[in-house]
Structures are given as C-alpha cells and as structure tokens.
Amino acid sequence: MYIEKKVSDPAISTNFHKIRQIRFLTESTFILRFDRGNMQFKAGQHIISGLKGELNQREYSVYSGESDDYLEILVREVIEGNVSVRLKHCKPGQLLQVNGPFGSFGLEPFDVFSRKLVFIASGTGIAPFHSLVSTYPGINYTLIHGVRYNKEAYERNYYDPDRYILCTSQESNGGHKGRVTGFLPGYVVDPDMLFYMCGNNNMIYEVYHILRDKGIPEENIFPEVYF
C-alpha cells in the first residue's frame, strides 16, 4: 500500500511561491508548476512543500530542469494523505511554502557525459530523472519505468523512445509485461554503467540485489527512496 510520507516537524518557511498551473496526467496524478523565485537546485534534489499556512508538508523531487524559469513537482493523490489531496484542489494564484532544496541524489559532473547511465524508477519516482534529462539533454541514458498501467507512463513522449523502457505489472501494452524486477535479470549490463534508482523501498531493495548479482559494484548503484 502506498503511504504518503509526511515531514513530521516541518520547518516554518518564509519562501512562498505562487502556483502557475496544475496539469493532470491521470485522474489522480498531476504536475504542479509554480514560480521559481531565487531558488537554485541541482537536478535530482527534492524540496519540502505544502500550501501556505498549513502545517502538513511533504518531500517532492523537483521535476523541472535546472534552467527552467519555474519549478515543477509530480504529485500522485493519496487519499489517506494530508498534502496531496489539498494540492490536487489548489488553484493558480495560491501560494506554496517551499523549503529546500535538499539531498545529494544526482549526477557527478565528471560522470554526466562520460558514462552510460541507467535510471530505474517506479511510479512517480520518475520525477528526478525527468529533471536530469531536462537538464542534460545529451546524456547517454536508459530509463526503465515500472508502473501498474500504461496510463501511468507519465509524459513518456518526453523521452527518446529508444531510451525508454516501460514495465507494466497489470496490463500488456507493447512494453515489458511485468515488474521492473522481472525485467532486469535479462537486461544486459556492463560493470562500468552507473545505476540510479528512485521509487518505493521494496523495488529499490530488490533491484539492488539483482544488480549486485549481475556484477555491478556497489559504488555504481545510487538509490533514492521516494516513498
């Protein structure tokens, strides 16, 4: 079951950003775009955000690229959650309070264009990889995205189709029928590749052990637990 992770002791923020747009990808998943202000971040980092004046806040990876003049986050509504439900019903012009950026997940400068990169995501864990591809359009990457249904292949047309692999666990759609963890054992790898993972804890745990069994050294595996 998906459990929305909430920051237990949110910092009081004076960084307020006006919402520009809410763009729905499915009935429960949307992209929230808001003013960037003077925030500087590195692709792969996350922020802590919630509506102005509300105590509940949540961590979201930045979805937009480093050079965009706005910030975006990818949000999936969690009925039991306190933040995503409120964000789903927000309107342009409302204010978000934003803290951050935080985290060290991302690419090292010397690896950006010199290494083969494999991005592995489940669900909305694709968000930091969208930011990385936006920021570094010339990188040599493959994106493996695990979802339940084809409609959850969020903005798949943004990525080079030769670099995007979709794994769907609940339906067949021309991609791999099954989970990411079912696809990876047959995926040809090289020990020099760098692997970045973002998604639920179970996926990351299983993928880590699959990669280690395939001979990928631990120092070439970078996890980010998204929820």
Image (cartoon, rainbow, N blue to C red):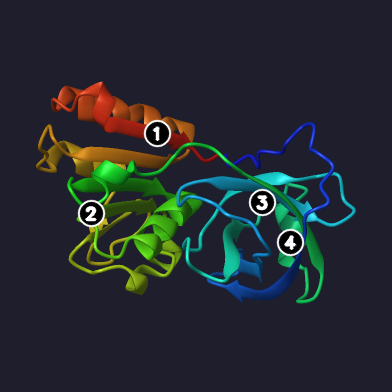
Identify which residue is drawn at 46% across, 63% down: 65
Mark sitting earlier along the chain (2/4): 4
Label 1 crowd (10 A; few <14 / some 14-19 / many >=20): some
- Alpha carbons under labels 2 and 4: distance apart: 31 Å
Classify 68 as above or below 142.
below
Disc ID at residue 223: 1
Marks 1,2: beta carbons within 8 A: no
Disc ID at residue 87: 4
Q: Position of residue 28 (x, y in %)?
A: 61, 64
Q: Which residue is mark 3?
A: 78
Identify the amino acid type marked 3: Val
Q: Position of residue 119 (x, y in %)?
A: 31, 48
Q: Quadrant of the N terminus?
A: top right
Q: Position of residue 83 (x, y in %)?
A: 75, 51
- Alpha carbons under labels 1 and 3: distance apart: 23 Å
- Alpha carbons under labels 3 and 4: distance apart: 11 Å
Mark sitting earlier along the chain (1/2): 2
Q: Is residue 146 left or right of residue 117?
A: right
Q: Which residue is mark 2?
A: 142
